[in-house]
Image (cartoon, rainbow, N blue to C red):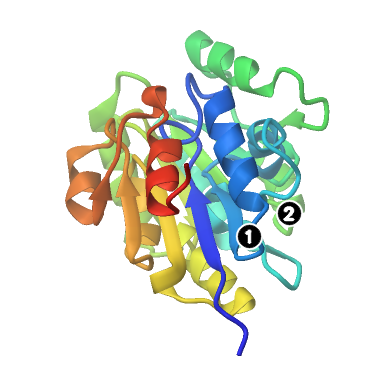
Amino acid sequence: MKKKPYLVFMDIDGTLAVSHQKVSRYTVKTIETLQKRDDIIFYIASGRMYELACLVRNQINPQVHMITSNGAYYETAAGTVSETLGADALTQIYDVSHQYNLAVNFFAHDTVYYTKKVPAFVLRNFANIVSGNRKVRSYKASDQQLLLNHAAEINNGIMISPGHGELLKEARQELASEQLLELSSSGKDNIELIPKGVDKATAVQAVQESFGTDAAHTLVFGDGMNDTGMMQVADISVAMGNALPQVKEIANYETDTNTNDGLAKFLRQYFEMN
């Protein structure tokens, strides 16, 4: 009987990468060494769109598989799966963003649609992440119809309002009222907009099924609230030292911070590397 493979799922920001961009040489070497075994399969599991997540994956190697857009776009053993927000959810998001005067970015696997100019520091951070990837395109969604024309491509989105937490709270309540999508957050200044019934956990479960493995052979590393779902479908759930307190409460293990190679340190100890 063929033994079950181990699946390793790694969030990017605050987990695998330092300063949102760089994977340390120590971590790369650790992953590359473990990839030489035939029973360990690595995945990035990120809220980022596919092409932006590839900027980090490519620092390791193409053998690292992908879950992106908070579980809406991912690779299984059988091929790629793409979940979309759908026309009804896009319409509601667009209406709420105008009602509260909030910026929204919508993501396909290689395209960004934005509704209005976002604050300068957001643009700078986004540009730092995008730099070096010419595959990413962006368009201003000047009206609702442009978004609806691309409804079959848009996997997820993010609503942004730095320094306006109360406004975001009201918008979130409005978005939740019609139950057309899943809501999460990677920080206090945003709302992550995800297709109904989708998150990182549903993607992890689909990957587990496709490779014929189980929670006992699944490792999950994360630091934010959008990582907690996938932690609950893995027996080896690991919170980074810099993770939110709520994440540490859910995880079965804790490791060092992302800036101190916590992910690599845990892998080396768990798989008894010299």
Say if 137 sits above or below 8 in the image: above
Give me the residue at 45% from left, 38% from top.
264
Figure quadrant of the N terminus: bottom right
Residues marked 2 and 1 touching at CB (< 8 Å): yes
**Mark 2 or 1 closer to N-term?**
1
Image coordinates for residue 113, horizontal then vertical, percent: 68, 35
Image coordinates for residue 229, horizontal then vertical, percent: 36, 60
Q: What element carries label 2?
A: loop
Residue toward you, 57 or 229: 57
Identity of the amino acid at label 1?
Thr
Seen as rendered, the residue at the extreme right is 134
Q: Distance between the residues labelled 2 and 1?
A: 7 Å
Q: What element carries label 1?
A: loop
Residue toward you, 138 or 143: 138
Horizontal side of 192 relative to 68 (left or right) equals left
Determine which residue is flagged by label 2.
153
Give me the residue at 59% from left, 53% from top.
42
Q: In which quarter of the image is residue 79?
A: bottom right
Say if 271 sits above or below 32 in the image: below
Image coordinates for residue 77, horizontal then vertical, percent: 71, 70
Determine which residue is flagged by label 1.
84
Give me the residue at 70% from left, 46% from top.
108
